[in-house]
Image (tube, rainbow, N blue to C red):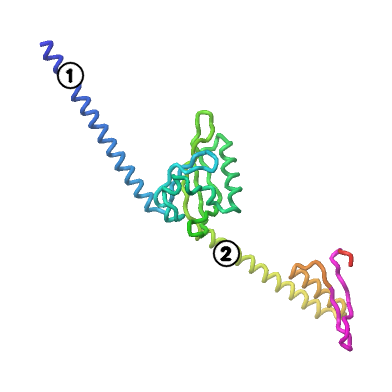
Amino acid sequence: DDEEHRLFLDVSNDLSFALHQLEIEREQKKFRENLDELNRTVNLSPLVVFRWSSDDGWPVEFVSKNVVALLGYTVDDFLSGRVVYKELIHPDDVDRVRREVEKNSHDIRVDLFVHEPYRLMTKSGRVRYVRDRTIITRNSSGEPVHYQGVVFDVSDQVEAQNLREKSFLESLSRTRELEELLRVAKFVLDDGDFTTQAREIFESAKNLTGATAGYVALLSEDGEENDVLFLDSGGVSC
């Protein structure tokens, strides 16, 4: 009886262990399937997932396969170190991006931050504006060890905004020019003194062109020389 009981316990334990291992394998398989599905979803989306080390230059430790659609470089280009992410940032933006990383890294209360849009240079030489949402992974001392981010192309939005701003400024400039011309025209109609009129037209021309100095001269009757009516040196001795 004792032997049978011992055998029963051994079989039960072996069966329990086998069932437990089977359950673990099922969970692992389910996890792998979910992970594969997540990877497929990410790689079909415009969102590129990065994991950077906090070491100098932010070496890339992981990047999703769809990075090739955004930048033209492959996963292996980044993981091998042939391509350095920091070196792809536009020279006019890299210092600002670095300051944003340092500012948020030094504040241990921050675990997520969003960069202002910055430019990346693609393999073909094209410039792309991207937005970058980054999570900071810290060690027990609060020091950053990794940055995990989602980078996505916002070139169309930024360029559209730039176009709207340019159109607005051009509209303001045209309005300003029209107002200045109307002001001078009214002055000319209201004042009959030529010298005063010429001076007012000169000042208006300075306002419209941004000039700081100049003069108004009349050609002499014989056409041989200019008769300077007035001179504005802009505060510089002549």
Q: Quadrant of residue 217?
A: bottom right
Magenta stretch in the rendered image: 215-235
Question: Which residue type carries mark 2?
Answer: Arg
Locate the C terminus by quadrant. bottom right
Residue 50 placed where, x, y %? 45, 45
Question: Residue drawn at (21%, 29%), measured in percent from left and top?
Answer: 19
Element assignment for label 1: helix
Residue 120 sits inside the magenta stretch: no
Residue 36 placed where, x, y %? 32, 45
Residue 82 placed where, x, y %? 47, 48
Q: Nearer the viewer, residue 165 or 18?
A: 18
Locate the N terminus by quadrant. top left
Element assignment for label 2: helix
Total labels: the figure holds 2
Q: Answer left or right for 168 relative to 27.
A: right
Of marks 1 and 2, the one in the foreground: 1
Query: Which residue has dot 1 on it?
Result: 10
Q: State if disc 2 and disc 1 touch (CB < 8 Å).
A: no
Question: Residue drawn at (58%, 36%), measured in percent from left and top?
Answer: 107
Bin the neighbour count of mark 1 within 10 Å (Cα to Cα): few under 14, some 14-19, many 20 and up. few
Q: Answer left or right for 140 relative to 230.
A: left
Q: Nearer the viewer, residue 12 or 182?
A: 12
Work out whether 92 lies above or below 55.
below
Residue 229 sits inside the magenta stretch: yes
Lower sequence index among marks 1 and 2:
1
Bin the neighbour count of mark 2 within 10 Å (Cα to Cα): few under 14, some 14-19, many 20 and up. few
Work out whether 197 lies above or below 136.
below
Q: CA distance from mark 1 to mark 2?
A: 78 Å
* Residue 164, label in figure: 2
Question: Which residue type carries mark 1?
Answer: Asp
* Residue 128, label in figure: none
